[in-house]
Amino acid sequence: MTGLEKMKNQILEEAKNSADEKIKDANAKAEEILAAAREEAEKTAERISKKSEADIANYKDRVKSSCDLKKRTAVLEAKQEMISEVLDRAFEMLKSMDEAEYFGMLKKMLEKYVLPQEGEIYFSSADLEKMPESFKRDIDAVAEAKGGKLTLSKEGKKIEGGFVLAYGGIEENCTFKAIFDAERDRLSDKVHEVLFV
């Protein structure tokens, strides 16, 4: 082998060694970059996983809360419907009482609502037709006991149960419907206590 070939081989050997060293360094650097990228990817995946878990838990809570609200609303509506039904039945029972009970109740209402003034009292045409004479005397007696006087109107009003008092042009609606409407909240509370407490 000549000197030139030896030099050539030495240069080639040095170039190969240098290239091998650079490849080794490049591979180490690539491995380092890959390790850092893997670590970052794992951290990102963990963050995404935790966020997903939190989102899922939050969604579950919202769904449960929404379901609970719908359930409470449905129960409340059912209770209100039942209370309304009980009050409607009670109102119908008042209208369908036998004559003695009916006029007995009207007498109690007179005692509560009659004022110590002169006035007029109106009933429905149906009540005027079936009104016993004793009740007409009760009207006079209750009014006198309160320090007033009531004249029974012969004209029937379009009302269902109860009566209307008129004092000096001002009417006091004492019909069952008006009393039920005015007392509806209190009566609803009483029915609620009986049914649900």
Image (tube, rainbow, N blue to C red):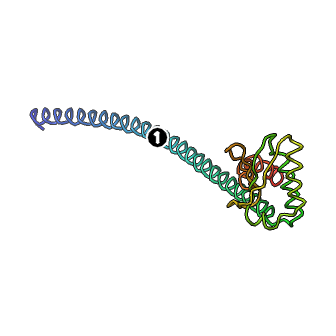
Between residues 96 and 33, which one lies in front from this camera angle?
96
Query: Residue 130 appears at what percent x and percent y?
Result: 82, 67
Is 92 on the left-hand or right-hand side of 14?
A: right
Q: Quadrant of residue 7?
A: top left
Between residues 151 and 16, which one lies in front from this camera angle?
151
Query: Residue 181 appears at what percent x and percent y?
Result: 70, 51
For disc 1, the neighbor class at 10 Å (few under 14, some 14 to 19, many from 20) is few
Query: Residue 168 appears at what percent x and percent y?
Result: 70, 42
**Callout 1, which amino acid?**
Glu
Q: Is residue 3 above or below residue 118?
A: above
Quarter of the image containing the N terminus? Answer: top left
Q: Is residue 137 above or below residue 13?
A: below
Count up the numbered dots: 1
Between residues 91 and 169, which one lies in front from this camera angle?
169
Between residues 41 and 157, which one lies in front from this camera angle?
157
Q: Secondary structure at mark 1?
A: helix
Is 176 on the left-hand or right-hand side of 43?
A: right
Query: Residue 54 appears at what percent x and percent y?
Result: 55, 42
Residue appearing at x 77%, y 56% in the figure: 162
Quickly name the residue at label 1: 42
Q: Quadrant of residue 13?
A: top left
